[in-house]
Image (tube, coloured by chain):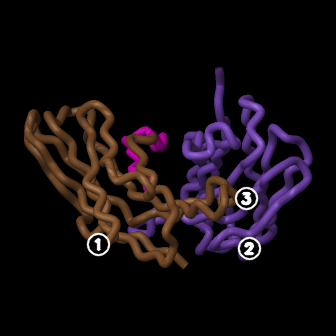
Chain colours: A purple, B brown
Amino acid sequence: NAGVTQTPKFRVLKTGQSMTLLCAQDMNHEYMYWYRQDPGMGLRLIHYSVGEGTTAKGEVPDGYNVSRLKKQNFLLGLESAAPSQTSVYFCASSDQLTNEKLFFGSGTQLSVL
Amino acid sequence: AQTVTQSQPEMSVQEAETVTLSCTYDTSESDYYLFWYKQPPSRQMILVIRQEAYKQQNATENRFSVNFQKAAKSFSLKISDSQLGDAAMYFCAYRSYAGGTSYGKLTFGQGTILTVHP
């Protein structure tokens, strides 16, 4: 059972480039989330989704867009990458039955030069 | 908005000894959940323990236990009989209850790096 899979695991971008991070879960979870982790700041919620076709802003949404076209996938897009978006990005999922437990992916290390 | 503070950037412990990691939080809510997550060098986030605010009894999971002081807004993690595999970054996290609609929107502390010496 794969759980939550993030691709890619590492990526280097130049300022102004765009990219999409893919999160896929095979647990049929309703809820999915994107967090970013920065040194000394813990994890912060970027965007989340409570079901297919829905998205909502989290704590730090600026500069990011998301889509949830299929229940199992949650995409995080950077339209014009900035050095401030250098971070480790985590996807997570949960549902009403496991709502107190988030299932995390293994993270994506993104560097913007 | 809720805030979570971990005032110990780093802690160390000898193998087989006990260590306590501190966490305080600020909230005006009465119903919420608190969590401790472990992040080893592999980066994987692992749930260690969780506490419901309405429960007065402190949660325990094998060698891991918490000291939940609701009035003081304190939520410390005690690791007994520390093992080399316990070495990791530990995060304290808060989630509103909000009638069950807060989903998995967690507020994390800054993290504490735990080193275990053999």
Residue B44 lies, in percent from the top left, at: 48, 40
Comparing marks 1 and 2, which lies closer to the viewer? 1
User: What is the magenta range?
Assistant: B34-46
Q: Is A80 left or right of A58, judged from the image as shown?
A: right
> Disc 2 on helix, strand or loop?
loop
State which chain disc 3 sits on: A
Q: Is residue A70 magenta?
A: no
Q: Is A96 left or right of B34, judged from the image as shown?
A: right
Q: Which label sits on residue A48? A: 3
Q: Earlier in the sequence, mark 2 or mark 3?
A: 3
- Compared to residue B22, the image places residue B118 above or below, namely above
Toward the viewer: B31 or A44? Answer: B31
Callout 2, which amino acid?
Answer: Gly
Q: Is B20 left or right of B59, judged from the image as shown?
A: left
Callout 3, which amino acid?
Answer: Tyr
Callout 1, which amino acid?
Answer: Ala
Give yes or no for contact between labels 1 and 2 (Cβ–Cβ under 8 Å): no
- Compared to residue B65, the image places residue A76 above or below, namely below
Comparing marks 2 and 3, which lies closer to the viewer? 3
Q: Residue at x 72, y 76 (%)?
A: A62
Regarding residue B59, the answer to whether it shows in the image is: yes
The residue singled out by tag 2 in the image is A63
The residue singled out by tag 1 in the image is B72
Q: Is B76 left or right of A97, judged from the image as shown?
A: left
